[in-house]
Amino acid sequence: MASISTEAGALTVQGVRPSKKRTPWLTVILLVAPFLIVYAAFLLYPTVRVIMLSFTNADIAGKGSYIGTANYVKLWKDPLFWASLWHTIYFILLTVVPNTALGLIFGLIVVRQKRILRGIVLVLLFMPYILPVSVVTQIYLWVLSAAYGIVNFIFNVRINWFQDPYWAMPSVAFVTIWWTVGFNMLLFIAGLEAIPREYYEAASLDGAGGGLRVFRYITWPLVWPVTSLVLVLQLISQWQIFNQVYLLTNGGPFNKTIVVLMYMYQQAFTRYKGGYAATISLALFVLILLTSLVQIRLLRFRGNT
Amino acid sequence: MTTRGQSLANTVTGFLSVAIGLVWIFPLYWAVNTSFTVDEKTAQIPPYWFPAPILLDAFKYVIKNTAIIRWYLNSVITSVAIAGCVLLLTMMCGYALSQIRFRGRRFVFLAILAGFMIPGATNVVPLFMFMNSLGMVNSYWGVILPQLASPIAVVIYKQFFDQMPGELSDAAKMDGATDLRILFRLFLPLNWGITWALAIILFIWSWNNFFWPFIVISKTPMMTIPVGITQVQSWYGIAYPRQMASAVLAALPTAVLFVIFQRRVAQGVAITSGIK
């Protein structure tokens, strides 16, 4: 490496300029094609195929015939689909804002610490994020178990957290926040560290006083770009909630926690209705797409101001 | 006086923050604690706060009676393959998009950017049908291939190569270096930091990925470890120490990676979410 750069330096000194050459197509294809083939086959093609499938009565092997918009009519009249959509939105309401707020609080806690202490606190708060989801759910099925769970023991209650119609979804939401808040915290730490220290020094010289005022007028507005990013990333990923619900409640009790992706999964892989499952996927895809478009609008808007 | 007051305040907030961290991580401690005990102890009231004596029965049982070693192997093979292939493919594509002027370059880049909007989860039905028609259900290929289509990594590499000074590659070209040589001998060594951070975060993500392996694998010996451990319960009913032992074993590799490469993991999270 070092030798190349010194040679390179010598050449520039000689003032030789590279001549314009024809496009090296062979190299371009060699470099671009491998990724593009994988990308087209496993991301673009399935996206197009989902639309095509939604107009068929295909089974899970993909065999079936064109049935027009019958799947869409069925979806519109399907109470279980609307229930799953409502549960997904309820889950989003329970997670997105609290998870973002807690991420910011944890970020503020970590950036205040120095050296070793900072490393320790960061590891403790971030650790859950690097666990596989099934490890997290196994842990909570034990910690929150009705009979011998430690949480029920400590608070001296007898709640069956994941099977109680009232507590099931909030419990899934809590487990999700516990698992993923570290990710938000890391983004907030990056944002908080980007705030120039002089702002805080100037504030203390001006006698801006209380920590709350400094937070309100300096930290909050300057960290807002990260906050909006975290909110949207959350929203996009929470629309796709499946794993935690499947592993903790399996949609129960009484379908109280069935979510859109889970309904799609059941239609596809336990009832073998590929066409209808594709229609459900497409509905979810459109909702997520709208969220992403809002994100782009938000970023543009902020860019202009 | 103020400095003394401040240092006292720092000590107090320091202790407080560690306390918050310990409370937050408590469920994980509880899992480890339980994994070192035996079934009868889990029903004890008051509960067992510390694993004394440390009993390895649950670990021995899980290793002997489940396919956990095989699941480990499956996870290592697929995660290493995914991280390695994604890096290679996206690095090459990002290099061409950044350094070579060719007709259609802008179109290719926009097409890749559009991929950001596609949530992988809504594609599983056609993807499963596709893998089924290729005969790749219940195979390593079935797990690996769909996880290679990572547009974000292409964009990250393109942006990093865009920042490389133009004279560097011009000079190397004058010297007769091919594009491949410039990429692997000049740009790659200059970007080891970013590649390393991406490698670790990609490995952790694919190790932890649950949804797709869960869809494409139904045969127990082919499962990756996060999917496999969910079988432990159905194999011998509810037995918390065994379940916690399998959970601890499943979490160990990424947890160790994280503790060792903390900064790289943080960097990986930041660059893949567009903060840096």
Image: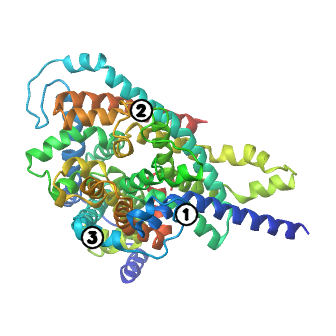
Which residue matches tag 2? Answer: A88
Which residue matches tag 3? Answer: B63
* Mark sitting earlier along the chain (2/1): 2
Question: Is B178 placed left or right of B190 in the picture?
Answer: left
> Is there CB contact under 8 Å for labels 3 and 1?
no
Question: Is B41 placed left or right of B98 in the picture?
Answer: right
Which residue matches tag 1? Answer: A124
Q: Where is residue B162 drawn, in percent x and y?
A: 41, 58
Q: Where is residue B74 drawn, in percent x and y?
A: 22, 64
> Do badges 3 and 2 share one subunit?
no
- Look at label 3 and name its amino acid: Ile
Seen from the viewer's position, the closer of residues B148 and A177 is: A177
Find the distance from the CA under tag 3 to the CA under tag 1. Answer: 28 Å
Residue A45 to residue B37: above or below: above
- Judging from the image, mark 1 belongs to the subunit labelled A
- Judging from the image, mark 2 belongs to the subunit labelled A
> Is there CB contact under 8 Å for labels 2 and 1?
no
Find the distance from the CA under tag 2 to the CA under tag 1. Answer: 29 Å
